Image (cartoon, rainbow, N blue to C red):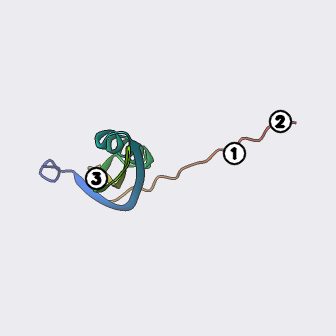
Amino acid sequence: MIRRAGWHFMWVQVSCSRQGYGLTEELAIHRALARALSGINKRFNAAEFDSLRISRFPGFYIANVTMEARQIQQNTSLDVVVERHTLAIPAR
């Protein structure tokens, strides 16, 4: 659908893996997904689910989720965005 609309789906080699803990399997997955999505750099406009691993322990669950960063855009080249990091220097 993306290509038929004249857009391009860029495969970027950037992934983000995060863990989530919860008393239920659903809660652990939800927390891991939320953390993994928030870990994807904001310059990418899409993410693809890669993997999910759930571990069960007495009384709680741990979910490990991996997401891959993706870019959907109209042009064919991946624009490199220069990120500026501002360093705050306290006044003396």
Front one among 51 and 74: 51
Q: Residues within 10 Å of mark 1 (few under 14, many from 20)?
A: few
Disc 1 marks a residue whose amino acid type is Leu
Q: x, y (%) of residue 24?
A: 32, 40
Q: Nearer the viewer, mark 1 or mark 3?
A: 3
Q: Residues within 10 Å of mark 2 (few under 14, many from 20)?
A: few
Instruction: Identify the amino acid type marked 3.
Output: Glu
Which sits in the foreground, 28 or 33?
28
**SS label for mark 3:** strand
Q: Residue furthest bottom?
A: 13
| Name of the residue lying farthest toward the right | 92
Q: Left or right: where does residue 65 sit relative to residue 84?
A: left
Q: Earlier in the sequence, mark 1 or mark 3?
A: 3
Looking at the image, residue 51 lies above or below residue 84: below
Mark 3 or 2, which is nearer the eye? 3
Q: CA distance from mark 2 to mark 1?
A: 13 Å
The residue indicated by pointer 3 is 48
x and y percent of residue 48 in the render? 28, 53
The residue at which mark 1 appears reads as 87
| Vertical placement of residue 2 versus 34, above or below | below
Image marks 1 and 3: residues in contact by CB distance under 8 Å: no
Question: Does the rendering let one see residue 76?
Answer: no
Give above or below for 66 relative to 92. below
Corner quadrant of residue 15: bottom left
Q: Which residue is mark 2?
A: 91
Residue plotted at (12% across, 49% down): 1
